[in-house]
Amino acid sequence: MTASRFLDGFILRDETVNGVRIHYAAAGDGPPVLLLHGHPQTHVVWRKIAPDLVKAGYSVVAADLRGYGDSEKVESHAPHLPYSKREMAQDQIGLMRALGHERFAVIGHDRGGRVAHRMALDHPNAVDRLVVLDIAPTLTMYEQTNQDFATRYFWWFFLIQPEDLPERMIGQDPEYFLRRHIGGQVKTPGAVSDDVMAEYLRTYRVPATIHAICEDYRAAATIDLEHDRADQDKRVDAPVLAIWGDKGVVGELYDVAQTWRDKVHSVRGIAFPCGHAIPEEAPDELLSALVQFLAD
């Protein structure tokens, strides 16, 4: 066991579930809450939120998705099944069960929100509440693609190119790509400190991580859409809170709350004055909204 350098009071551990080793940070007692990060971050994105959720009385687990951070990089090629959101969700269900949590709240940002959405569809008895941060449903976003979206979210179309074109291009200078990517999405100066950027880069520059990330996006544009279309008539049973940054692409291009009303039974929407990286840009506002939603 190792104390986290970034999440105060948390212990870092690894658990093998669903045939894959998942790295996570955990702390606290009380009702369980699972935190899932997005691209290009790791569980460290929750550093400004997670310790305060523990203080509020929750048992908090912040995990690295498979392929990201210090979790295992699973071998994957077409048809990209290992990085389907169904498999990634199953990892996290297995992790929470291994920790003794059969039913829990899940809060997902970006890619983690897409994993959380699939988790709530596939495992309705496990997901007590769902929070999605700065995303509209994957199928909705692809079906409503226009030039503005394709230009501003270019990586949705770059990362899905056939292996190994994006891997080679990013691999030539991963730091440049990472910094440009985060810099383009974060609208709050100073939200990502130098030490945190260095931590993101530590794992992002690993070739296996770059490949895994491309496979995550390739799965989103292929097998995930098949799963989503098959489940078009299903709705998430758990209460849902959708939060977005009104300075980000999702908030500017979509009626976010409405996109989720088509997918869930009950949703409440909130916009924050920030960009995409809500846990890093608006931690106080996010904490307040989460504590209220989790307690309702």
Image: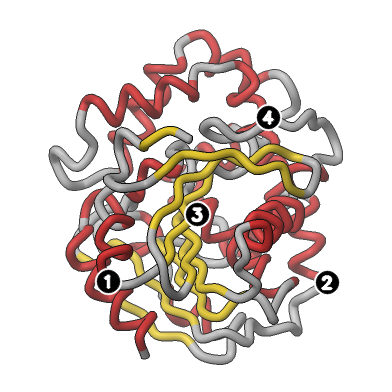
Q: Which residue is mark 1?
A: 56
First in sequence: mark 1 or mark 2?
A: 1
The residue at the far top in this view is: 172
Q: Secondary structure at mark 3?
A: strand
Give the residue type that dot 3 points to.
Leu
Q: Which residue is mark 3?
A: 36
Give the residue type that dot 1 points to.
Ala
Q: Which residue is mark 2?
A: 230
First in sequence: mark 4 or mark 3?
A: 3
Residue 225 pos. (x, y %): 74, 59
First in sequence: mark 2 or mark 3?
A: 3
Q: Nearer the viewer, mark 1 or mark 3?
A: 1
Residue 51 pos. (x, y %): 28, 55
The numbered dot on residue 244 is none
Q: Quadrant of residue 94?
A: bottom right
C-alpha distance separating marks 4 and 2: 28 Å
